[in-house]
Image (tube, rainbow, N blue to C red):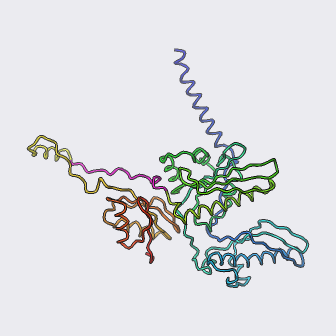
Amino acid sequence: MKLAGRIPLVVALAALIAVGRADAQLEGADRGIPPIDSASTFEVTGIQVDVVAADADKAREEGWREAQQKGWKALWAKTNGRPLAEAPALTDAALNGMVSAIVVEDEQMGPKRYIATLGVLFDRARTGQLLGVGGVVRRSAPMLVIPVMQTGGSFQTFESRNLWQAAWARFRTGNSPVDYVRPTGSGIDPLLLNAAQTRRPGRGWWRMLLDQYGAADVVVPEVQLKRLWPGGPAIGIFTARYGPDGRVLGRFTLRVENGAAIPKLLDEGVRRLDLLYAEALAAGALSPDPSLAVPDAPVATEVADEAEAQAQSAATPSSAPQAAAPIPGAANLASVTVQVDTPDAGAVTRAEIGVSRVPGVTSAVTTSLALGGTSVMRVTYAGDPAALAAALQAQGWQVSGSGASLRISKGGGD
């Protein structure tokens, strides 16, 4: 009796301890870094200027003016794949109307001299017309970013503000072809998006997380930060992982000579990891994992009412049960992940209607929407996916890929 009377008390204490631990993990304001919104700008970084003028203010003003000119030429050359010398000349007044901001990466000011490394942000809408790109960048399906940092024998993601999360938050993604979904790290993020989750292969939990954050797949950029001694040289080992299985796309090592340069080390690591992900996207290795698509709900079959079933049973001369007539193609239903370019909302509707009209398609639902990029549809087809690809080509779509993962587009615009 005494033991039985203590069980509820023990259970209650255990529950209180568990709740207390959860509250302790979520409490506190030292968490959450909102990422920079760079969708409306083009960015050019690393512009070197060295200017001498009558005084320090004029030298700085002249340095910023020179940075705008160099930034414009670099942006034009990068976008068009042409030499810097062929970039069209623009007046200072025209550039002032296109430049959104000057980013000071490093500067030294003297009485009459200004030496700096600057970045220039160009307004995407006003600059895109001169670049001939219309301000739109073709992007991947949305990728959830879980940055993992290993330092001092421990792993960190969003448990507290850290240098690696801050580096990803200030990274400007406007020029990247990868559509990164960057959590702020506040609220429930530390409990859901931790280092342990990045090692769990179970698809059910991943589907829930990706659906909650509006992503189609996940990228896990990792850094192992080693400090040789406090304030001394630091080494960063960077790894680009992708997908719920943590597939490694590339790895590299960077080093700085003092602890004060660690933020620059991490910024450079983010930039190079983005290049690895962009190269994987161009090679077709960054497509959403079909196993992460939410499975179709069971199709309800119509059942005859009881009276009709009894009447049919009475009219049947044989007492043996009758086999139900098979549904054509039901045994061969295939779920296919289809990527499609969707520059606007109208393209999404046209793609769903166009694919659903293909003979044999029973459903075509957009599971990941990316306006201005690549959306993902889940298509249920009664037959072999190869036959679906052929049927889409017959409808005028350009089709690439194979098996249960296809990519479609309208060559001449839709």
Q: Position of residue 341 (x, y in %)?
A: 48, 68
What secondary structure characterizes most of the magenta part? Answer: loop
Q: Quadrant of the C terminus?
A: bottom left
Q: Is residue 253 magenta?
A: no
Check the image and report above or below for 282 versus 196. Answer: below
Question: Residue 11's spot in the image, x, y percent?
Answer: 55, 27
Residue furthest toward the left? Answer: 317
Please state which of residues 250 and 177 is positioned toward the viewer in this rendering. Answer: 250
Q: Residue at x 59, y 80 (%)?
A: 132
Q: Residue at x 51, y 49 (%)?
A: 206
Residue 281 location (% of width, % of height): 55, 63
Does 300 lie within the magenta span?
A: yes
Judge left or right: residue 383 versus residue 61: left
Residue shown at 74% from the left, 49% from the top: 226
Q: Is residue 291 left or right of residue 169?
A: left
Relative horizontal placement of residue 69, taking residue 79 as reference (left or right):
right
71 shown above or below 304? below
Name the outermost residue toward the top. Answer: 1
Quadrant of residue 387 in the image?
Answer: bottom left
What's the residue at 67%, 54% (across, down)? 238
Q: Give the residues in magenta.
A: 289-304
Q: Position of residue 14 (x, y in %)?
A: 58, 29
* Residue farthest right in this picture: 111
How many numbered badges does the structure rendering display?
0
Task: Return the residue nearer the eye: 78 or 314.
Answer: 78
